Amino acid sequence: QVQLQESGPGLVKPSETLSLTCAVSGYSISSGYYWGWIRQPPGKGLEWIGSIYHSGSTYYNPSLKSRVTISVDTSKNQFSLKLSSVTAADTAVYYCARTTVVTPRYFDYWGQGTLVTVSS
Amino acid sequence: EIVMTQSPATLSVSPGERATLSCRASQSVSSNLAWYQQKPGQAPRLLIYGASIRATGIPARFSGSGSGTEFTLTISILQSEDFAVYYCQQYNNWPLTFGPGTKVDIK
């Protein structure tokens, strides 16, 4: 059974960088699939942030691309998100998820999500 | 960017009844559409992909239809555990985009 678990600070100051990691168990990232990040502001809908393949190939949402870096560490079977210059608008539950093989498409396994609040 | 809209925003249904949810894309997404269910405090769960293919373990009472710009999710006989928010998502073009959701609540 594929399981994903997000980790990272729950509170980030404005203008700083948000950093999260997603640990994957039950499946080797090196075996394939794209892996991605999605966020959900409190009480609102879902926004795709970006996705990465084990080779390092990435797709980013253009609305966030200038501030986002997604990386993968196959030795630790995990991938990470960095979002720079955060503001209160970046306060959200951040989910990591597995997407499909050829290109990022739909998401079949999700982490439980982690709330990140941007506040001084 | 493809904009997804969903209607209605809220659907009040009695247990045992049928629920029909709509999703519309601002341009054709072919059959590259997924549906998710989200309950409070939980991550979304994949229900349907390819507009009509049920994901692993999803009960047969959930069905999806449509192509192009108009899509429907039908829950044939609502169970108590089906009261939740439902999102559609297109994956025909990047960026991947989601609809705003339809909340199915108890009438």
Image (spheres, coloured by chain):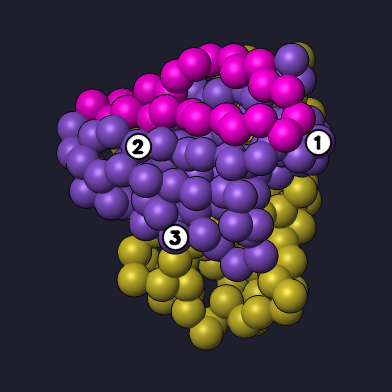
**Residue occupying image coordinates x 54% and y 67%:** A72
Chain letter matching colour purple? B
* Residue position marked by numbered label 2 in the rendering: B71
Q: Marks 1 and 3, how far apart in space?
A: 23 Å
Numbered disc in front, either 2 or 1: 1
Q: Earlier in the sequence, mark 1 or mark 3?
A: 3
State the extent of the magenta-drawn residues as a range.
B1-26
Output the chain of dot 3.
B
Q: Which mark is residue B53?
A: 3
Q: Is residue A70 visible?
A: no
Q: Amino acid at mark 3?
A: Ile
- Give above or below for B58 relative to B44: below
B21 drawn magenta: yes
Q: Position of residue A19 (x, y in %)?
A: 65, 44
Label 2 element class: strand
Disc 1 residue crowd, few under 14, some 14–19, many 20+, Cα 10 Å? few
Colour used to depict chain A in the structure image:
yellow
Q: Position of residue B87 (x, y in %)?
A: 52, 34
- Give above or below for A34 relative to B66: below
- Give above or below for A83 relative to A29: above
Q: Quadrant of residue A89?
A: top right
Output the chain of dot 1.
B
Q: Amino acid at mark 1?
A: Ser
**Residue occupying image coordinates x 66% and y 40%:** B77
